[in-house]
Image (spheres, grey):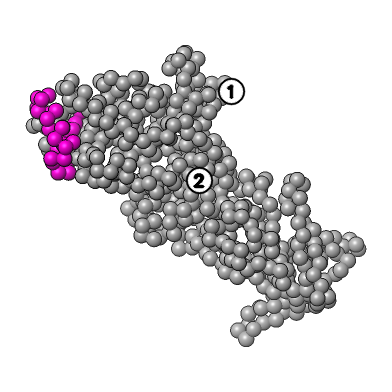
Amino acid sequence: MSIESTNFIRQIVARDIAAGKNDGRVVTRFPPEPNGYLHIGHAKSICLNFGIADSYGGACNLRFDDTNPEKENIEYADSIKRDVQWLGHEWRNLCYASGYFERLHGFAVELIEKGMAYVDSLTPEEIREHRGTLTEPGRESPFRDRGVGENLDLFARMRAGEFGDGEHSLRARIDMASGNINMRDPVIYRIRHASHWRSGDKWCIYPMYDFTQCLSDALEGVTHSLCTLEFEDHRPLYDWVLDNVDVPCHPQQIEFGRLNLNYTVMSKRLLNRLVQERYVAGWDDPRLPTISGLRRRGFTPASIRNFCERIGVTKSDGMVEMGVLEHAVREDLDNDAERRMGVLRPLKVIIDNYPANRIEELVARNHPKRPEFGERSIPFSREIYIERDDFMEDPPKKYFRLAPGREVRLRYGYYITCREVIKNEAGEVVELRCTYDPETKGGTSPDGRKVKGTMHWVCAENAVDAEVRVYDRLFQSANPTSENFLNQLNPHSLEVLRHCKLEPDLANAAIESRYQLERQGYFCIDADSDALHPVLNRTVTLRDSWAKQAA
């Protein structure tokens, strides 16, 4: 693969290897905070970091940025590991920022001893007030010129737990007049009397993200530290810290544009609110852009990897249409998903001239383009179910499905003709009486007559009752704003259909197995299923129905 044919990050890595930088090593890392479930934006970073390492014979670490004890827990950490592995990646080392706490503390002491960090006794609010603006320089803290001995003593007492939250903090001494606000004496340690999910109550001071990430990278021998574009202004601080402490190497930070997807939200804070306030059923709700939600909906690892490759890596943030993600899974499932028939809104059909006690087995291919997938038997009898939308009593001119006096083809079966419409007292159609032509088995007529409509169906006697959850986009707005995003929720994002009818072999389908229900879309067997009550989630329609709406 030539440098010119790849994205800009691969070009940088390839040039570094060619120049012998880092002795030709390539080490990346994926460093999520375990404060929520991963979403599709994280998948882009996962595919990029692990993909770079794999392409150049390097290694990628999974590192938990666990320095915020109030919001992190083992549930989130376990979910992250599952998601990374489900996407098809394996880390070289499993690391934790908390595993470096002692060494990070040592680096902080080193900065204090060099006169490059000081303990500040301003409150967090006062620190923000002193920080200045984009057009005005910051003001120096009155505690900025504390001596090294006093700073070491105060920092040791901070660690010992003598002070309350927010009473003191450790700040880097850099430049309060810097045009980059991140360089205006940033806080690098704060007091938090909170139990940590790994270290318990051992620590009551915790390092800040900007201090932790660069040093963790260096301790792990990371060569290329890939992060999203919002950290571009933090890069001078990343380099400043590494330049001023004794570390084994100096990784290179490279920023790329983050993934934004329309008709959803990607903020962990907003996603957490949707979960905690029960607007969705949990982090794995199939309407969410979380990896676990996409998995439960029926997305495949390959479809997500292909999506990430398709959207590419750029130097600017961009909005990607949901249709691009849906196209990726539709493309994958079209190739790999076996076909079945299912009726979501059943209408009974009785074929009067078919033998009453007879059940015959029709043969169907499991995939029209994959003969290696084999064939299956489908039971057929006098009573079947068709889709309610496949019948119209007074159809328009170009309606080619079933109607009084009209002949249609049953998929894999026979030609049938509607002879009578049975209604209930409310005038609703509840049953159709039809006849069939026994000479048309397999869907062809010996006399050469043609029919324009072909319909799916299931045998009434052998059909499996199922629940089908029809998912749509979570938001009505293409770009929901964080201020009033709850007002933009789509009230029709989930429709639960009960008493659906499926082919009998779907009763024993494995959890997460995926099928195309012919003419309906692609579906996944949900974890709520059992042999007596299958539950299917619609992954995606056969075609992009939203494209028509937009047009």
The answer to whether residue 119 is above or below residue 458 is above
Q: Which residue is mark 2?
A: 321
Quick one: which residue is furthest to the top in this view? 19
Q: Which residue is mark 1?
A: 1
The answer to whether residue 389 is above or below residue 420 is above
Q: Position of residue 194 (x, y in %)?
A: 24, 46
Occupied quadrant, residue 411? bottom right
**CB within 8 Å, label 1 to label 2:** no
Residue at the spot 66% in from the left edge and 64% down from the top edge: 502
Q: Which mark is residue 519?
A: none
Q: Position of residue 9 (x, y in %)?
A: 47, 26
Task: Give, as a single range, the part of the protein colored magenta.
Answer: 145-173
Q: CA distance from mark 1 to mark 2?
A: 29 Å
Badge count: 2
Q: Position of residue 376 (x, y in %)?
A: 76, 56
Q: Position of residue 326 (x, y in %)?
A: 56, 48
Res 275 visible: yes
* Amino acid identity at mark 2: Glu
* Figure quadrant of the N terminus: top right
Tell whether position 436 is magenta: no
What crowding class fits label 2: few (fewer than 14 Cα within 10 Å), some (14-19), or many (20 or more)?
Answer: few
Q: Nearer the viewer, mark 1 or mark 2?
A: 1
What crowding class fits label 1: few (fewer than 14 Cα within 10 Å), some (14-19), or many (20 or more)?
Answer: few
> Which label's residue is closer to the chain start, 1 or 2?
1
262 or 351, which lies in front? 351
| Element class at badge 1 | loop
Tell whether position 165 is magenta: yes
